[in-house]
């Protein structure tokens, strides 16, 4: 396809403003997918995405659009996630396209992630077309939201397109605007091949699939290619475009987006952000590449059944191919055996990866308490990263401890501002700024990341009835009075439950945790003390009383099938339990114990 007949774009929006629905309509109206194959949220292909109703991975589709000028254009759409944990996916996709549709819910206005995502688009040099969605809603106020976009983001919104992605209203205008208002890609067909490795994933039938955006030159089936960073060499077996299912194509030229397979065995060979060129006639300079993602939350993942360790290793390696933003390192624990210490971009990211490992790879996992990375300044001058509270050295060697801080931007209607300020204050926040756009407040806080990663977002949503939006960036490290709190169950320390807390909050956190654990751990035939301790000092204590008698005895009656069912249920339940000394702790307890109410 000629360059001037290509448009590459992404859609940026705050979560739930209708990005995926708009993508569905664009695909539908252009007949890209036959009507009978159409389903809602077409691009959210993962089960987890469909269940949670969110986009996690960026997805791509090639659309052919016959425009009003009589010409047919190829439109490549990259759908991107909206949640703050997946900002990394957004920034990556942005580099592969020239323009963005900015979708803003006309009944809500600009939200925190609208801002964060649109700034990424602006940074990537995109042309931006504002789109006002959900104008079918009675509460929609397109004029006010236009002013709001100009006010808060500072871009011209006078030509914003009013649409209803739900009913299809305004979709033809969006398609015309993509062609008329977004720039065509640039590139030189005769130059040596230079293609960006945008994404890669593992397909059970095809092996490693690599998504590329060609900048210069032409790539053809059969070509010998080289990945510049990793130095890997391969022959192209198959080139396809995504419609959104794979359709084979003979070549991809400048400005085009597609996928290739090349019998790639080594998952490590395909690094997102790498430059692909021809082995024989390479381009002289590699593309700048992507900023590596910085995991901020760490936790241990252990197989419930020790025999599954190799399977877990394999699954992690495959998932990392699909999601370069999570890291892993082998770990051994006295209680849990062999496993991995994994790093994530946030708690939602952690949950999604754990879900994917359990479902896509059929593994039973134990997740240990998540932790951020602390910096230990040792007395001998050494600075150590502490990824796991269990590794906390003896305090006599530690001079001071620093923790990561964030700049949090929260947008909220006036009425809920008081609740938001209280929540931030409770989490050791320092207010930096407070401004208004109409009746919505924008408040900026400096907060410790550790107070945010577990359940801040959930709390924020509940105190504001879902009206607040939130986004954050890590700003740096700061010293504070932090201590390690251990949890003892039946007088044995459970490493996987130890956490780092602020000294002033240790008592209340300790009390909350032991109370939670008392509910989370099932009763045993004996009494179980549950304690929280700092150093050797117990700061909170609960006792789980013993089971009085065999409670199942009377259910058994004489009914054999019922008995069998009960036993099976117990067996299934067992799989999710782990033995600590004489006590069985359910897998779910490790994260649940940390949530603060
Ligand atoms: P993520 O994929 O999670 O980032 O969200 P999204 O921005 O893709 O939002 P999505 O398309 O999933 O839409 C969110 C909700 O808004 C869904 O329940 C849609 O049905 C609804 N919605 C989308 N467009 C419209 C619209 O034009 N009008 C109305 N009334 N509802 C809409």
Image (cartoon, helix red, strand yellow):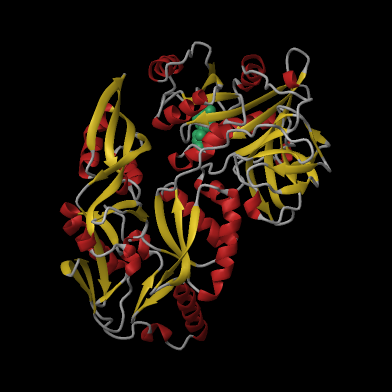
Quadrant of the rendered structure where residue 69 is? top right
Can residue 175 be seen at all in this image of the molecule? yes
In the rendered image, residue 53, in percent from the top left (x then y), is placed at 51, 44
**Residue at the image position 26 percent from the left and 33 percent from the top:** 416
Number of residue marks: 0
Residue 404 drawn at (x, y percent): 32, 45
Q: Nearer the viewer, residue 548 or 574?
A: 574
From this viewpoint, which residue is outermost toward the bottom? 558
Is 585 situated left or right of 88 in this image?
Answer: left
- Residue 143: which quarter of the image? top left
Name the residue located 53 percent from the left edge and 12 percent from the top edge.
159
Residue placed most toward the observer, 375 or 349: 375
Q: Is residue 134 visible?
A: no
Q: Nearer the viewer, residue 202 or 560?
A: 202
Q: Please name whichever residue, 33 or 312, is drawn nearer the observer in this view of the structure.
A: 312
Residue at position x 48%, y 43% in the image: 293
At which x and y percent is residue 339? 47, 67
Residue 427 pos. (x, y %)? 24, 44
Locate the N terminus and report the quarter of the image it occupies: top right
Image quadrant assignment for residue 580: bottom left
Q: Is residue 256 above or below residue 144?
A: below
Q: Vertically, is 259 above or below 130?
A: below
Is residue 197 rendered to the left or right of residue 192? left
Residue at the limit of the structure toward the front, as seen here: 380
């Amino acid at each position: 396809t000629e360059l001037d007949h290509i448009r590459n774009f992404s859609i940026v929006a705050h979560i739930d403003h209708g990005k995926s629905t708009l993508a569905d309509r664009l695909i539908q109206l252009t007949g890209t997918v036959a009507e009978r194959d159409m389903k809602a949220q077409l691009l959210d292909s993962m089960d987890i995405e469909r269940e949670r109703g969110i986009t996690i991975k960026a997805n791509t589709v090639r659309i052919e659009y016959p425009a009003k000028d009589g010409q047919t254009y190829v439109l490549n759409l990259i759908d991107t996630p909206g949640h703050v944990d997946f900002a990394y996916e957004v920034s990556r996709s942005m580099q592969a396209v020239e323009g963005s549709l900015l979708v803003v819910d006309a009944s809500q206005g600009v939200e925190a992630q609208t801002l964060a995502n649109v700034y990424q688009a602006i940074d990537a040099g995109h042309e931006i077309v504002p789109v006002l969605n959900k104008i079918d809603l009675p509460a929609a106020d397109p004029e006010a939201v236009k002013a709001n976009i100009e006010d808060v983001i500072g871009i011209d919104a006078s030509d914003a397109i009013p649409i209803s992605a739900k009913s299809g209203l305004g979709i033809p205008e969006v398609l015309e605007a993509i062609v008329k208002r977004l720039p065509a890609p640039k590139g030189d067909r005769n130059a040596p091949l230079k293609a960006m490795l945008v994404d890669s994933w593992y397909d059970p039938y095809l092996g490693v699939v690599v998504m590329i955006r060609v900048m210069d030159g032409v790539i053809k089936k059969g070509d010998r290619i080289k990945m510049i960073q990793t130095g890997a060499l391969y022959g192209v077996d198959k080139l396809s475009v995504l419609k959104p299912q794979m359709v084979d194509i003979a070549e991809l030229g400048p400005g085009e987006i597609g996928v290739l397979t090349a019998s790639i065995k080594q998952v490590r060979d395909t690094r997102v952000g790498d430059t692909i060129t021809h082995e024989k006639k390479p381009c002289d300079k590699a593309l700048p590449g992507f900023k590596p993602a910085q995991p901020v939350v760490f936790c241990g993942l252990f197989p419930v059944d020790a025999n599954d360790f190799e399977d877990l290793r394999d699954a992690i390696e495959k998932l990392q191919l699909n999601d370069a933003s999570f890291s892993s390192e082998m770990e051994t624990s006295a209680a849990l055996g062999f496993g991995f210490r994994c790093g994530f971009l946030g708690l939602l990211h952690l949950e999604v990866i754990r879900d994917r490992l359990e479902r896509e790879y059929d593994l039973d996992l134990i997740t240990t308490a998540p932790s951020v990375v602390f910096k230990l300044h040792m007395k001998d001058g050494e600075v150590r990263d502490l990824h796991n509270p269990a590794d906390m050295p003896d305090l006599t060697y530690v001079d001071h401890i620093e923790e990561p801080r964030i700049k949090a931007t929260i947008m909220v209607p006036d009425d809920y501002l008081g609740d938001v300020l209280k929540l931030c204050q409770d989490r050791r926040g320092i207010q930096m700024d407070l401004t208004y756009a109409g009746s919505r407040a924008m408040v900026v806080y400096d907060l410790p990341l550790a107070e945010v990663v577990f359940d801040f977002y959930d709390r924020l949503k509940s105190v504001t009835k879902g009206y607040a939006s939130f986004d954050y960036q890590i700003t740096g490290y700061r010293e504070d009075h932090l201590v390690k709190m251990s949890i003892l169950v039946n007088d044995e320390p459970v490493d996987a439950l130890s956490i780092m807390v602020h000294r002033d909050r240790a008592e209340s956190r300790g009390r909350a945790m032991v109370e939670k654990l008392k509910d989370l751990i099932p009763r045993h035939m004996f009494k179980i003390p549950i304690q929280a301790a700092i150093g050797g000092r117990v700061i909170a204590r609960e006792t789980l009383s013993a089971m009085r008698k065999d409670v199942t005895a009377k259910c058994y009656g004489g009914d054999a099938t019922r008995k069998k069912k009960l036993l099976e249920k117990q067996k299934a339940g067992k799989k999710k339990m782990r033995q600590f000394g004489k006590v069985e702790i359910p897998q779910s307890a490790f994260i649940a114990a940390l949530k603060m109410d």
